[in-house]
Each structure stands twice: as C-alpha cells, then as structure tokens.
Image (cartoon, helix red, strand yellow):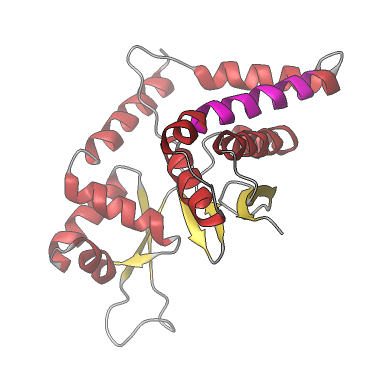
C-alpha cells in the first residue's frame, strides 16, 4: 500500500474509533440529523451532558475528521466571544482489513454501462436489477405484517427499510427525504445513471410492500439523495 493510502487508512481507523464512544456517537448523530451547524449548547442539551463535556467531545470529532467548525460571525453572535458552530464533513470513512475496494469495481461497472456498445439495453438491465433488489428488501416484511398498506404505513415501512441501507430517511412535511446517498461519489460523478438506479431501487422497495399509495420521484437537493417519497397524487 502506498504511503498516501496508508495514511488515509490510519485516519479512517481513528475516525471509526472516535465513534466507539457512546457520547461522541450521539453527538455525531445529532449533528447529522440537524442538517445545519449546531452550537455546543445545542449539542449538550440534545444528548443530556454538560456544555464543557460536549465541547470536549465535539472537538475530538473535529480532530477525527468527522466534524468541522466555524465561528459564528460577529453580526450573528451575542456579546462576547463568537461561539463555535459544528457540522458534519463530507468525508467518506471506510475501514476494511484486509483492504477491499468495491467502490473501484462499482466505478468500472457504472462507466461500462454508460460507454458500452448497447448502453440503452444495459441501462434497462441495471434498472431491472435495482428494482428487483428493492422488492427483495421489503417483500418479506409485506408477507409477515400483512394488512392494507396505507400512505402513512407505507412511508414508515419504507423509511425502516431504507434506513437499513444507509439512506438516513427523515420526514419533510408530507414527504420523506433521504439525507444520505449510499452511492456517493458515484452519484456525484454519474448522476444520470446512479440517480435513476436509486429511484428504481426505492420503487422496488415500495412494490415489495405492495403499496400504491406513495411513490418515489426524482427531486434533487444539495447534499442529499435525489429521491423523494411522497403520497401518490
């Protein structure tokens, strides 16, 4: 392994180790869920610890590369020293021992889909497989729980399924948004392919539940997955 790769690997291990502390994990989860910079006071209140202890752990998360901070601008702050405001970084943290690079294979296959001799047919095959994987994610749930799948129940079960895959769903009014795209940075580099496959996967999740009361639509938002789940119109 080259030196740069080794350094990145060590950094990733340190980042994961930082989340081994329960308080730090809860602080990190809070910062991600808020979707805006948070203060030490807000973080302390959210997890039920003192401001001093929150400051210590938040700064440790910064050192680990999981959070970054800025000082509140003078115009925004009250009298006194501007407070630190913390937010998650965009770093992707992966630890694999021994080293594994599935993202490299994913990148190769994604570019092959777009540049092959028959890209339309290959895209159709990829869409079909993505849908099938989505169906498989929830078909067992539909069989065991039974009953009619209304809009609210479909939303809740879909959120549970997508949370297991790392999408970090949250409610936004009547809709469900997905805070995280598990396929980033492929989605950033190849949105025309990956975002459609995301949508096909989520549609499969809904079809696996047997739901016709909600739908998966493309609704891109900065820093989030491009798919939104909303009641059928």
Residue 19 falls inside the magenta stretch: no
Image quadrant holding the C terminus, namely bottom right
Depth order, front residue of 227/100: 227
Image position, residue 221 (x, y; %)? 63, 55
Q: Which residue is drawn at the image coordinates 45% and 60% (left, top)?
A: 35
Residue 187 at x, y percent in the picture? 63, 37
Q: Measured from the top left, where is residue 98 in percent x and y?
A: 34, 11
Q: Nearer the viewer, residue 161 or 151?
A: 151
The quadrant where residue 118 appears: top right
Q: How many marks?
A: 0
Q: Main secondary structure of the magenta part?
A: helix
Q: Where does the magenta region start and end?
A: 122-138
Which residue is at the front of the view, 134 or 113? 134
Q: Is residue 126 above or below residue 27?
A: above
Residue 133 part of the magenta-drawn span? yes
Q: Quadrant of the image for the N terminus?
A: top left
Q: Which residue is drawn at the image coordinates 54% and 41% (left, top)? A: 181
**In this view, 213 is above or below 142:** below
Q: Is residue 100 above or below residue 183?
A: above
């Amino acid at each position: 392994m080259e030196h740069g790769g080794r350094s990145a690997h060590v950094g990733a291990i340190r980042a994961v180790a930082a989340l081994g502390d329960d308080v730090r994990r809860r602080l990190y989860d809070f910062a991600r869920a808020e979707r805006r910079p948070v203060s030490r006071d807000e973080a302390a209140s959210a997890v039920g610890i003192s401001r001093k202890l929150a400051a210590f752990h938040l700064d440790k998360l910064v050192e680990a590369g999981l959070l970054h901070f800025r000082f509140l601008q003078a115009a925004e702050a009250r009298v006194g020293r501007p407070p630190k405001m913390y937010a998650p970084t965009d770093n992707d943290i992966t630890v694999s021992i021994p080293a594994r690079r599935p993202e490299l294979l994913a990148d190769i296959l994604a570019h092959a889909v777009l540049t092959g001799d028959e890209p339309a047919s290959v895209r159709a095959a990829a869409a079909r497989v993505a849908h099938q994987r989505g169906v498989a994610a929830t078909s067992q749930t539909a069989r065991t729980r039974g009953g009619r799948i209304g809009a609210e129940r479909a939303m809740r079960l879909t959120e549970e399924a997508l949370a297991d895959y790392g999408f970090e769903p949250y409610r936004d009014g009547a809709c469900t948004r997905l805070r995280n795209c598990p396929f980033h940075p492929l989605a950033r580099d190849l949105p025309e392919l990956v975002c459609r496959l995301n949508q096909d996967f989520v549609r499969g999740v809904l079809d696996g539940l047997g739901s016709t009361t909600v739908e998966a639509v493309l609704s891109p938002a900065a820093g989030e997955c491009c798919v939104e789940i909303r009641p059928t119109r």
